[in-house]
Amino acid sequence: MSFCSSSCSSDTDSESDNRRGLVSLEDYTSSVDSGSDSEEEKPEDDGMVMLLFYERLLIDLMEKYSVEDIDVRLSIQHLTTNYRQVCNGRLPSEIDYNNTRHCLGYLHRYAACHTFLVSEAVSAILNESDVLTSPLSKQTLNVVFLGGGPGNDFVGFLTALHGKHEAICALDVTVVDKMSGWENVFNETVLKLRRGACCKAGYVFDDVNVSSTFITADLKETGGWSDEMETKLRNADIVFLVKALSHIPNEDKKDVLQ
C-alpha cells in the first residue's frame, strides 16, 4: 500500500448573473494565480481548467439546492475566521459541513487551490520517484481518500494520473469523511467528470472503469468503522491523507495514524 500524506430550480437572468458574479474567477482569492500572461490563461492549463470546473460546479449546486449568494458569502467568512484560528489541531468551533451552504463556501474559497496542490504533489511523486510504479501497473487500482470531503484530492489525483494510466482497467475510489453532507458534492463532482469535465481528470474516465463510494466515518473513532470501511482500507493500494490531520487535535493524531 502506498500512503500519500500532507500537513435547484431555474433562476431569472438577473439572479443567474448574480451567481456568476459571485463565482467569477477574480473572486477565487485563495486559488492559483492566473497571472496576466495570456499563455497562462489557456483553457488547457490545469490551474485554469480547475477554476472553471469548480465555478461551474458551484453554480450548478447553488441552483440545485437553492442557495443564495449571500449564504455562500457568509459561509466563506465563517470558514476563513475558523481556519485562521486553528490551534493544536482544534478549530474554535467545528464547521458543520452537513450544511450545504458551508460546503459551497468551501468549494468557492478552497477547492481549486487544494485540487491544484494535490495534482502538483502527485505529479512530482510520479516524475521523481518510483513509489507508485507498482500500484499503477495493476489492472485494478484501489484508492482511498481519508478526510476527502468533496473529492478535491480525487480530482487532483486524476489530473496527475492522466497519461500514466495505461495499465489500469478499473479504478475503485473511496472517499471517507465524517461529514455526510459532502456526499452530494462528491457525487456531483464524479457525475461531471464522467461527462468529460475538467479535461485531464475527465479524460481518465474515457479509458478506465471508475467506480466511486462515499463512506461516512470519523477517523478518530475506529471502533465505529463499518465493515465496508475496514475492507476498503485493507484492499487499498494507495491511501491519501491530505491536510486531514491539521484539524485533528494533537493528542489524537498518533492514534489516527496508527
Image (spheres, rainbow, N blue to C red):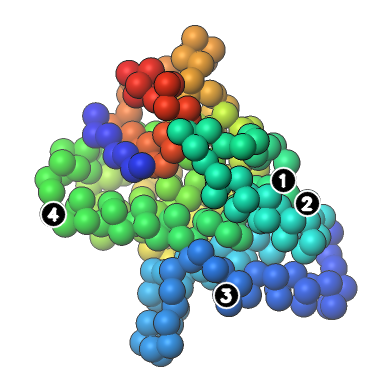
Give the quadrant of residue 66: bottom right
User: Is 142 on the left-hand or right-hand side of 252?
Assistant: left
Amino acid on which disc 3 is placed:
Leu
User: Is 150 on the left-hand or right-hand side of 211?
Assistant: right
Q: Earlier in the sequence, mark 4 or mark 1?
A: 1
User: Is 20 on the left-hand or right-hand side of 53?
Assistant: right
Query: Looking at the image, which residue sits at the far right?
Result: 12
Position of 180 relative to 39 (above/below): above
Q: Are the two marked residues, 1 and 2, in contact with CB atoms closer than 8 angstroms?
A: yes
Position of 163 relative to 122 (above/below): below
Q: Earlier in the sequence, mark 3 or mark 2?
A: 3
Q: Quadrant of the C terminus?
A: top left
Position of 200 relative to 98 (above/below): below
Q: Earlier in the sequence, mark 1 or mark 3?
A: 3
Question: For mark 4, what is the residue?
Answer: 128
Residue 110 in the image: state x and y as whole percent. 53, 56
Label disc, if present, on residue 25 of the rendered structure:
3
Q: Earlier in the sequence, mark 3 or mark 4?
A: 3
Question: For mark 1, what is the residue?
Answer: 100
Residue 205 in the image: state x and y as whole percent. 42, 53
